[in-house]
Image (cartoon, rainbow, N blue to C red):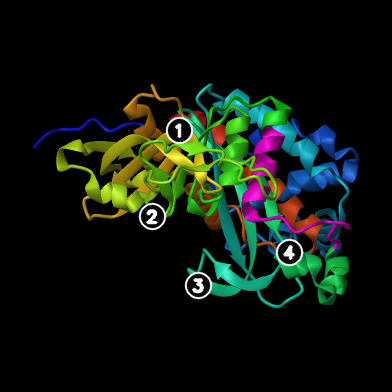
Amino acid sequence: MLHIEPIATAPVLDLTPQEIGTIIDELRAYHTIYRPLFQRREPRERSEQYLHGLLVNIPRKSIEPMVLTLKGADRNAVRAMQQFLSEGAWDDDAILQRHWQEVDADLGDDEGVLTLDGSDFPKQGTESVGVKRQYCGELGQRANCQAGVFLGYVSPQGYTLLDRRLYLPQEWVTDGAYAERRKACGVPEGISFTTKPMLGWMMIQAVMQAGTLRCRWVVCDEAFGRDTTLLDNMANLGLWYFAEVPHDTHVWQVRPATAVPNWSGRGRKPTRARLVEGDPAPVPVAEIAAAVPADAWSRQSIKEGSQGPLVAEFAMQRVIAVRQGLPGPEIWLVLRRTPAGELKAYLCNAPADTAPTRLVRTSGMRWPIETCFETGKQYLGLGDYEVRSWRGWHHHMTLVILALSFMVRLQGRLKKMLPP
């Protein structure tokens, strides 16, 4: 049997809060990086307590059990922490921008990968900001939930989360019947409806404008990859996207001819090019995959997560993207097929001379953000919050992001200190 050397992606984060929960001095030193950004003494102290609470070994990481674990039966401390999270005026953006600098110091790489994905949070009732009966990825069905969009980072040194946005369903923004709920939840006035791909773009744009975190690639699933505006925005920023797309996504295998139609002498003179009659139409990527010869598939092994190497077959070719019914940029179509026959298709705007192994490796860079969600929900209370406000949701997610990066920062050194 032919041995295939696995292509490495990123090291697995397998450090748990149980292993670091007693490292108070380490946490205090980490918190000093962000401490000045909380401005006043009370939020500085409570932010450190909240980070500590997210790392303690208790079943649920909502405010009350965290505070009772750290401070004892102090109801005033519980109310103070609730106010800190739900109403505190500290600036999430400033903290996250400082966080990106630390991520670059810990994990930064010229080939760094931004990862874009959504994570949903089942909720009871109708009072929490943005809650609605909608598709919930965590449950795999429609349910009452909140939907978040997250941006992560991956490099050969590790991975973490960078930013988060709460998705507001359209009726939450435009329906007058939701006006009281918006006010009660502190939704900013004048907010407009924003799609999930556009929320992702806003986060990518913020990281790129900050200019403190090295990156080259963006990977995303088909929920984002189907949005051609998002793909073009990333390309215009100089990023290389590697986007999963639905099987019915159409491309041209050869660039078709276009021309501005001759003016008939009547009506408005044509200015927009159209496809020349007789040239081939674009075809679905699934049709292209079905026609790939057997000897054109290359078997590769990729290290994805804690499950070990994943073996898959790859085929890739240059194609022409479709933009508003006309030929767009020339890009890569990367096809990935498992031994069981599951097919995934990706579009990528990396240069034509990009090595195939580089494309294969990038196809395996999406698992880290999914692992961030698993770690966050299992160990760090990512979905355990009980705040209902807009500000509270974003505050909680900011502090979970910092707690996760604290674990990432300590993993290498602490693993050497712990017994096998």
In front: mark 2 or mark 4? 2
How much space separates mark 1 and mark 4, taking CA atoms? 55 Å
Give the amino acid type for the residue marked by disc 3 in the picture: Gln
* Circle 3 crowding by C-alpha within 10 Å: few under 14, some 14–19, many from 20: few
* Circle 2 crowding by C-alpha within 10 Å: few under 14, some 14–19, many from 20: some
In front: mark 1 or mark 2? 1
Q: Earlier in the sequence, mark 3 or mark 4?
A: 4
User: Furthest residue to the left?
Assistant: 1
In the picture of the structure, the residue carrying the numbered disc 3 is 141
Is residue 252 rendered magenta in the image? no
Q: Indicate the secondary structure of the residue bearing disc 1.
A: strand
How much space separates mark 3 and mark 2, taking CA atoms? 21 Å
In front: mark 1 or mark 3? 1
Q: Which residues are magenta?
A: 186-207
Give the amino acid type for the residue marked by disc 2 in the picture: His
Give the amino acid type for the residue marked by disc 1 in the picture: Glu
How much space separates mark 3 and mark 4, taking CA atoms? 30 Å
Q: Earlier in the sequence, mark 1 or mark 4?
A: 4
* Circle 1 crowding by C-alpha within 10 Å: few under 14, some 14–19, many from 20: many
In the picture of the structure, the residue carrying the numbered disc 4 is 64
Q: Which mark is residue 330?
A: 1
**Could one spot residue 153 in this view of the protein?**
yes
In front: mark 3 or mark 4? 3
Q: Work out whether residue 196 or residue 367 is closer to the camera in this orientation and state it.
A: 196
Q: Indicate the secondary structure of the residue bearing disc 2.
A: loop
Asked whether the beta carbons under mark 1 and mark 3 sit within 8 Å of each other, the answer is no
